[in-house]
Image (cartoon, rainbow, N blue to C red):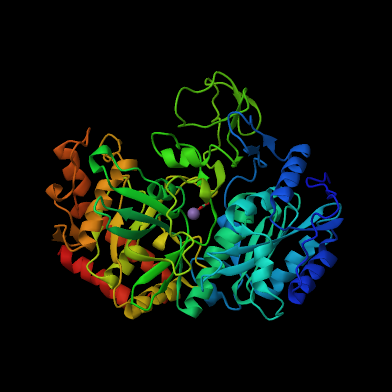
Amino acid sequence: MENIAPAISAPSGMGENKPSNQAVLDWVHEVESLTKPANIFWCDGSEAENNFLLEEACRQGILIKLNPEKRPGCYLHRSNPNDVARVEQFTLICTPSKEGAGPTNHWAEPAETYRKLQEMLKGAMRDRTMFVVPYVMGPPDSPLAKIGYEITDSIYVVLSMRIMTRMGRQASAKLGDDPKAEFNRGVHSLLDVNPERRWICHFPQDNTIISVGSGYGGNVLLSKKCLALRIASYLANKQGWLAEHMLILGVESPEGKKHYVAAAFPSACGKTNFAMLIPPKHFAGWKITTIGDDIAWMEIGDDGRLYAVNPENGYFGVVPGTSYKSNPNAMRSIERDTLFTNVALTNDGDVWWEGKDGAAPDAAFDWKGNPWTPASKEKAAHPNSRFATPMRNNPVLDLEVEDPAGVPISAIIFGGRRSDTMPLVFQAHDWNHGVYIGATMASETTAAATGAVGQVRRDPMAMLPFCGYNIGDYFRHWLETGKRLTSPPLIFHVNWFRKDATGKFLWPGFGDNMRVLKWIIDRCEGRGGAEKSPIGYLPRATELDLEDLEGISSEGLKELLAVKPNEWSKELAAQKAFFQSLQPNVPPELLAQEEEVERRFR
Ligand code: OXD
Ligand code: MN
């Protein structure tokens, strides 16, 4: 078998950051005995180490260095074409009982799964280097911060983890010497990148993740979906906090009044764009700042409010469609020090993707490395091509991003990609109604996971692929959290994606989403008007600030805000069927909410 990750030999003094914690050393030794690597590289997260590994990755053809004049510090990685997205069907939650994983997860018996994985990992790192990557998730002094170690045979993973997490010496220092101190054990091996031997396995009760057979970010950057969502949601349920698939943004008025908002949209539905939004001209003086673009860890503060931190240190965003028009702050973020995966390479050593500003290049290499021209049938960039960029590149990074206490959340927004049914925005009557709205939320599937694209599926709180335990218990945990919040955030639902009869989007989205956000903030301040509808409070057209908004007729606006009984009778039937598919796990409070909505439509 071809060795796709040949061992590297580090100069002396490098790769020697061995931690002192005996529990880490024992576990690494165990994995070494099983996988039989040629050598071990103990990462320290330093600049020198990063430079060495970047050079090594280029030498091995794992990365292509981009033109430093055009994209300083940037590299392109091409993944195996069979390995371009998360694989939900091969993602397992291995709790002791099937019930623990619940009806929405693929479950496997832990002992048996460990055995199968051990079989696959036997000698898997022969002639490869085993990297040991220590990292911290969350502002290091936050009570929510978590330490993880990822063992991997992929340099690309190491380089990406350095962008996406607080990686290196500080993690081992924070863990200290206590062999009982808690840390996440993550083992990753590319094996032979074979879809038939690809498994992303979680053992929440052991704080352990084992991922084999993939090199795609969402499957292998174990800090992200695996630890910060699946394992963290399990821990959060036990420990009384929330781990959510949410962006966190700050919104400051011209008078200097600031709110923070968290929003759960499914993968590739615009979280990064919303988190970095630039308000339209009419909103001069309003500022949006980013705390996080994908994951929020939240706990209740002494004042009874919900406080959020971003566990990550970088952004792993979808590239196609990103432009100076749609998201100037993301474009500025990826001008330097960025790892691109599966975008096109231009002849002058820059990158290109569908939806980038300006004309397509006359010729380029597509994401597979094949010659490409605008006449080619294939896309130049894969629809799920990605950037990994440090959050500090973001020109609108919020100053409180390192605050160990987190930022207070005024509003929670749920949202999906829906061509019909869902109005532009509505507000829940109260916390339990909001939990119901989140629990029944749905969205059209995207290229972020393998499988059909564009099909409406229920994706509760955007956590369907990421909840590490029984979804019924997860709903219950949300309901219990509401009881403990004396000043809960208000809850909203948005839909930027409603279409007219000709299939055209009704709402311009992007910066103009500020208009919806402004109404949400007004509601938080007890100001904005609304009318009661069977599904919640909706703004009247006059209650949204639409000044200077072009290209939207009063008919279009009516359609955007419409709650159509014929669409809602289908929607309620689908919501009911979804809850039925989860039974007997659905909390009675949510079934009562369902009945209430039905009653309000009668
Ligand atoms: C992501 C995802 O990569 O949700 O953030 O798939
Ligand atoms: Mn995500």
Q: Residue at the spot x=25%, y=37% of the render?
A: 501
Q: Is residue 47 left or right of residue 544?
A: right
Q: Is residue 406 left or right of residue 500?
A: right
Labels in figure, total: 0
Residue 101, image x, y percentages: 54, 72
Foreground pick, 244 / 368: 244
Q: Residue furthest front?
A: 255
Q: Quadrant of the C terminus?
A: bottom left
Taking the image as drawn, is residue 424 in sight?
no
Task: Give residue 171's quadrant in the image.
Answer: bottom right
Q: Is residue 215 left or right of residue 454?
A: right
Q: Is residue 518 left or right of residue 104?
A: left
Residue 412, image x, y percentages: 33, 62
Residue 147, image x, y percentages: 62, 68
Q: Residue at the spot x=41%, y=45% of the render?
A: 273
Q: In the rendered view, would you say 584 is above or below 320?
A: below
Residue 217, image x, y percentages: 61, 51
Taking the image as drawn, is residue 437 in sight?
yes
Q: Residue at the spot x=69%, y=69% of the render?
A: 113
